[in-house]
Image (tube, helix red, strand yellow):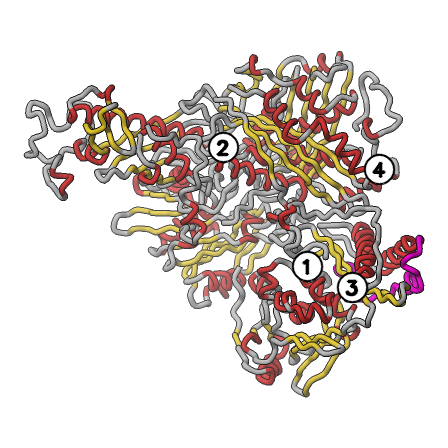
Amino acid sequence: MKPAPFEYHAPRSVEEAVAVLAEVGHDGKVLAGGQSLIPILNMRLASPGHLIDINHVTGLDDIEITSDSVRVGALVRHSGLERSDSTHAALPLLRQAVVNVAHPAIRNRGTTVGSIAHADAAGEMPAVLALCDGTVEVVGPHGIREVGWQHFFLGALETVLAPDELAVATRFNRMPPGTGTAFAESARRSGDYALAGVAVRVTVSDGVVSAAAASFVSVTDVPSVLDLTPALGGRELADAGFGSALDQAAEAVREHVAPETDIHASADYRRMLVAELTRRALPIAISRSNAAFVHESAVATVSSRTNAAFEGLGGGRR
Amino acid sequence: MSTRLFGAPIKRKEDPRLVTGGGRYLDDLGHGALAAAFVRSPHAHARVVDIDADDAFELDGVLGIYAHDDLPGKVGEPLPLLIPHPALTHGRTGYALARDEVNHVGEPVVMVVATDRYVAEDACQRIRVRYEPLPVVVGIETARDGAARVHSDVPGNVAAHLTQVVGDVDAALASAPHTLTLELDIERSASTPLEGRGVYARWDDERDELRMYSSTQTSTGVRAAVAAKLDLPLAKVECIAPDVGGGFGVKIMHPWPEEVLVPWAARRLGHPVKWTEDRREHFVAAAHERGQLHTVTVGFDDDGHLLGLDVKFWHDNGAYTPYGIIVPIITSTQLLGPYKPGAYRVKFWSLYTNTVLVTPYRGAGRPQGCFAMERTMDAIADRLGLDRAEVRARNFILPSEMPYDHGLLFQDGRPLRYDSGDFPATLSKLKALVGWDDFATERAAATAQGRKIGLGIGCYVEGTGVGPYEGSHVQVETSGRVNVSIGLTSQGQGHETVFAQIVADELGVRMEDVFVTTGDTRKMGYAVGTFASRAAVMSGSAVALAARQVRAKALRIAADALEVSADDLEIVDGTVQVKGAPSASMTLGTVSVLSNPLRYAFDEAAQAATQFAGTFDPDRPPVAAGDEPGLEGKDFYSPTQATFANGMHAAIVETDPVTAEIRILRYCVVHDCGPMINPLIVEGQVHGGVAQGVGGALYERMVYDESGQLLNASFMDFLMPYASEVPTIETDHLETPSPLNPLGIKGAGEAGCIPVSAVIASAIEDAEGFAITRMPISPSELWGLRRRYAAGEITPLRRASPRSEPADRAEEPTP
């Protein structure tokens, strides 16, 4: 399990990186955290002739928080995002989601932008980018461009990034006031790729849901946002019938997703699972929207994670 | 006498070294060695038509490329069939490199040796092998069907068929008030040690000798096999097992193709060669286990007593049978657990498939047998409306019935005769530990909260410490340091600790003065290996016997020197002293000096042993007739039969009412391995075993597609449980000594994993209300079963059905 020969480049600036990319074209691959790329190279599933290591490029490791957005540089590690309290205060969904990315050792090395550029349908952060109506900042030989999430993802493991372009940052838009978010996923083992996952946001004003949406992990081939306002909008939280609104939202999710069967779970199971996860995540999001809302769940949640000592160590439900 | 160390929960002596990076594993050795890599078959079944390596030879750094045609003499002959058996009528083994046919994905076809592993793998990629695909046999049903054959000369793909019978099963079933038939299946899993296999070999041209290192569970076995293959005198081959990062069975299989080829290449090239297995290779080119389909028909009376048990099962042995039919033999005998089966008939068919070969993996056929038997026990209890623990208790072999002979032959060809155990006591400890009698209340409380929980149980008996023998050499140096060597190997079990405990007690020395060496054929040439939970029983007994010899000799020499009777002496903390008068004493180091009469004094201590020291009787020779110089002893332990440990597990499991996610809330173990040398290590063994059992119950499977590709050949998709998936394990112990060995001990290495699939299935079934008959089970599969159950396609358990009727007589359907 050794990679095929490749030429190693260690540019010091974005311009230099882009110049190398332009020179090597399709034969080049960008190395950031390497948590997906290196195993692929070692298994010789890919044999690029050039590896462009951007870890020495300056100016890519900042998190910038403005009143509208959180901009995450291409060298910000998942763990950096996870630990940043100011980021959490600005956009809680980021931490809620990122702790579900694999295990701490992988989060210490893997980058959030890298995971978005990798565009794995099982990735958590592409779904988060979508729910935040985010953008990807791309630098190429002709300068900088900002690509909206809807246009960024073309398919599983496929994006609009050209061979001579580098994703230098992603911008996650902050939520309107009165919005609560939650992230839930279920994996076979803690930290594994999720069988299904969901990020939800709910905006509540005066005790009434004004907007709600969800995006998904592992059950759609590219990130997609489902507007749940038709199911939940205008519903009063105090209403005894709020549970049926949740059922409607779950039903909408069931119809929206297009999961596939693999060796770990059937498509039908994933469809049920993501609907149920949504059903359970929505009340959590609402409770975080500053609304005085206590949802009495009829069913306790069971995680496949078995050892109580590992609760709260990342992965699993948040 | 100082405090007894046997039985003390001493922290492991080797751990500071191992956990601080001081371990020396196979890949830590031989940095200057050439690297080997292999071109492995991408096809499950194909003829090898042509191999073109021209492009690969052009790479800088490639020193050798070898296919079967290049292998001389015995190296090119089929690998040995290690454990022949009369029922193994169609045993087949592969070649070190495939000759003209490949029989599973991953089978080695070409070996490349290069300056480093990168170049070697680059070369592999440039080698073009042309294959002509043949029909593929995957799965027991396909193999049993026999339409396609793995080996053209093996009809029906049947490698072996064996029947063992005790009593008249047909008559017992015909007259039984109740019968049940169950289909019970277990899927494939594997040992998957964290360190894969690995071989490093050096040829010494001047001495015409081979020194090899292998990450093995048997260095003596590898040494003999390699000497035979390379046509070398045994005296010219040394094999050392360095630190080994786990084995769990897969490394008792030998010689692996790589264990033959790497030494051969090292000799041919005149340069050390090393091969370190990577993870993908381990999945497709080592060994798997567990895949079996079982049909159990049982007859029983109104009280749940077994009257007759008729078991048929089909064992998937993979592409070859180098390790014989040990696994199905163990299933067929150990399935009986702690029970008296009434009349018993067991038949198995061991079948070839185009998959990785099957050799024992921790538990070795027992998890399957336990699953079959324990599912049957639960079904009987449900049929009769009886408590599941009570039905088991009614069928127990009682302490008063020990030794109990089942009338069958065990895996060592010797009678299946239980030597010890108190099953009722083990069960009552387990019921107390898990709160068996209070579970109804616990369940009612959970149900009121909308939660589903279930309680499961499983019992097993494990034959441990099989022969033929193990030995030990114990030597006291003049410094007082005690060197202990045993021939069997360690894969991290704590051998440096437990054997030191035994020696410290037997000899009267301090634990820190005892140094244990394992698995080095230079130190101990006669040994079998580490498997079958045998190290403590076999080597532990041998170590005790050898240490007793040393003690006797030390007392004799000291008695002479101190001019007292040996009976009046004791050894305390490494000093031989007169009982009650410790001022008359000498250290064991001094005794060691005296034991070896010297001509030359090389230090102060040695002076005492020289010829002018004036301490010797001039009328006696310096070394008496029949005596030997040196304070050392060597002895072997060879038992007439295995010793039988036992245990019982219970678990409380919760299943999510919507998502069918499965969570183990509690896991309880009561284990009886006789007196424990070190309870901390026994607990560790139990914990590790349960962890592997949880893997087999809920996570691990080998997913082959119909073309014979292993779809999950990585730790990303083969779901070995993390620590986060392993429950907290609650343990209790019973210590019924074995009458068979000097320490009364029984093995504990495999115990933890044996009943886990049975226990978890029992608990899920109890939570869900319908039978669980196939393991492992995932949430997706459980959810699928729920949908079939809701559609009326699966019969409810009687205890879960509000309309349950009293049991009818005979011929009742499978639950």
Residue B233: image quadrant is top left
Label placed on residue B789: 4
Label placed on residue B786: none
In the rendered image, the quadrant that contains the N terminus of chain B is top left
The reply to whether label 1 and label 3 mark residues of one chain is: yes
Foreground tag (1 vs 4): 1
How many residues crowd mark 4 within 10 Å: few (<14), some (14–19), many (20+)? some
Q: Earlier in the sequence, mark 1 or mark 3?
A: 1
Judging by the rendered image, the residue that carries numbered circle 3 is A181
Check the image and report above or below for B11 versus B3.
below
Q: Amino acid at mark 3?
A: Thr
Residue range (magenta): A215-241
CB-based contact (under 8 Å), mark 3 and mark 4? no
Label placed on residue A100: 1
Label 1, label 4: how far apart the Cα atoms are: 33 Å
- The residue at 58%/64% (across/down) is A108
Label 2, label 4: how far apart the Cα atoms are: 41 Å
Determine whether, in the image, residue B449 is placed left or right of residue B480. Answer: right
Q: Residue furthest front?
A: A292
Judging by the rendered image, the residue that carries numbered circle 2 is B533
Q: Amino acid at mark 1?
A: Asn
Residue B661 is inside the magenta segment: no
Instruction: Please state the chain letter of the residue tagged with numbered disc 1 in the rendered image.
Output: A
